[in-house]
Amino acid sequence: MGSTHRAALALVGILTVADLWSEYYLGFGLRNPAALAGVLAAVGAAAGVVRKLRPKALDEIAAGAAAAAGVALRPAVLVGLGAALTLAMATVSSVTIVADGAAAPDSLVITPLDDTSAATRGRIGRGAALARLPIVVSPFGRAVRVEAPG
């Protein structure tokens, strides 16, 4: 397996881990039908534009795409992406509030016990079963107070 193949595999791995993490902690990812539909719509629109271009323009686009892929697959870029993902995974988490069905909380407040000025506010929308609020933590976690009426 060549170095380009290994780099592409590493990029796919980084993107997969990022998707799994964001789905679990932030509540969205490519498995979300809306996100996936957005990606597919963008690809479809790009394909429609490409079909209308002249051969010379297509060659220029292909050369630009190859150059961009070459940059994205550089080891330094992959290490940077991996480091950024690791930092995000170590310092961003979320609190998930589940409504009891009878009286969904109309206003949620999550306050870190070590910094009461960094409160996060949110709400559970009508008909929703839960709310997921992202919070900044240390790699060792963070104690929070959750206020959820109802």
Image (cartoon, rainbow, N blue to C red):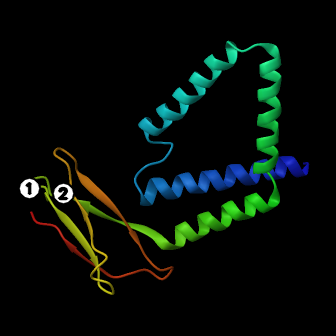
Q: Are marks 2 and 1 in contact (CB under 8 Å)?
A: yes
Residue 73 versus residue 65 in the image, above or below: below
CA separation in Å, label 2 and label 1:
7 Å
Residue 140: % across, % down: 48, 83
- Number of numbered markers: 2
Judging depth in this view, the residue of 143 and 80 nearest the camera is 80
Badge 2 marks a residue whose secondary structure is: loop
**In-front residue for pair 43/129:** 43
Q: What residue appears at the point 60 percent right and 63 percent down from the top-left corner? A: 85
Q: Residue at x 25, y 54 (%)?
A: 130
Q: Nearer the viewer, residue 68 or 144?
A: 68
Tell me the residue that label 1 is attached to: 103
Q: Which element type, helix, strand or loop, lies under badge 1?
A: loop
Residue highlighted by disc 2: 99
Instruction: Say if 82 sits above or below 28 in the image.
Output: below
Q: Which quarter of the picture shows residue 104? A: bottom left
Q: Position of residue 30 (x, y in %)?
A: 51, 43
